[in-house]
Amino acid sequence: MERLKRVAYECNLPWGARTRTYNSRRAQELGKWAESVDKGDEYHLAVFKAYFADGVNIGKVSVLVQLAGSLGLDSRRAEEILSRGTFKDEVDRDWEYSRASGITAVPTFQAGGRVSVGAQPYHVLAEFVRAAGATNA
């Protein structure tokens, strides 16, 4: 946890004293919707901050609906999407792809037959990309 905190600080990401772990499945489903309406980056950053900095339970529908609304997304539509499982199959496909690819943790980086697991400082990722054979590292 200390390493994650340090990396978050190095990357200028919000971080707080989180004492609980919450299920993010619903957040992932709503994230698929946010991506489909060009609000993905904003949504994912808001969920990251809520979870990692503020310790908010991102498994609660009411929390996710409020987050969506704060980004200008339709709160009623967000609640409907979650209650109907509109993006369930898309998230299931992502999870299946992850399992088939041998991904067991987040983040996981794969390139050129190499794998790097866990949050890494920029210089480590840059070397990973160079070693994987990328020319524009």
Image (spheres, rainbow, N blue to C red):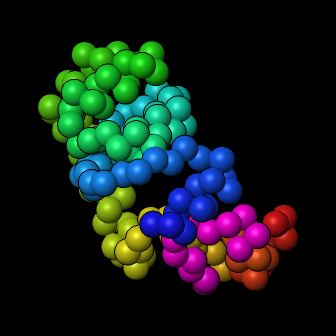
Residue stretch rendered in magenta on the structure: 113-124
Q: Measuring 15% from the left and 31% from the top, which residue is drawn there?
A: 83
Residue 32 makes an appearance in the image: no
Instruction: Using the rendered view, name the quadrant where residue 120 is placed.
Output: bottom right
Residue 38 makes an appearance in the image: yes
Locate residue 13 relative to residue 94 in the image: left or right: right
Instruction: Using the rendered view, name the quadrant where residue 14 is placed.
Output: top right
Compared with 53, 114 (above or below) is below
Q: Quadrant of the C terminus?
A: bottom right
Whether 118 is among the magenta residues is yes
Compared with 78, 29 (above or below) is below
Locate residue 130 relative to residue 12 in the image: left or right: right
- Judging depth in this view, the residue of 103 and 22 nearest the camera is 22
Residue 74, how many percent across, how many down? 35, 15
Locate residue 60 relative to residue 94 in the image: left or right: left
Q: Measuring 29% from the left and 49% from the top, which residue is drawn there?
A: 24
Q: Measuring 34% from the left and 73% from the top, which residue is drawn there?
A: 99
Residue 135, how many percent across, how many down? 84, 70
Residue 16, how many percent across, how many down? 46, 47
Whether 2 is among the magenta residues is no
- Judging depth in this view, the residue of 123 and 128 nearest the camera is 123
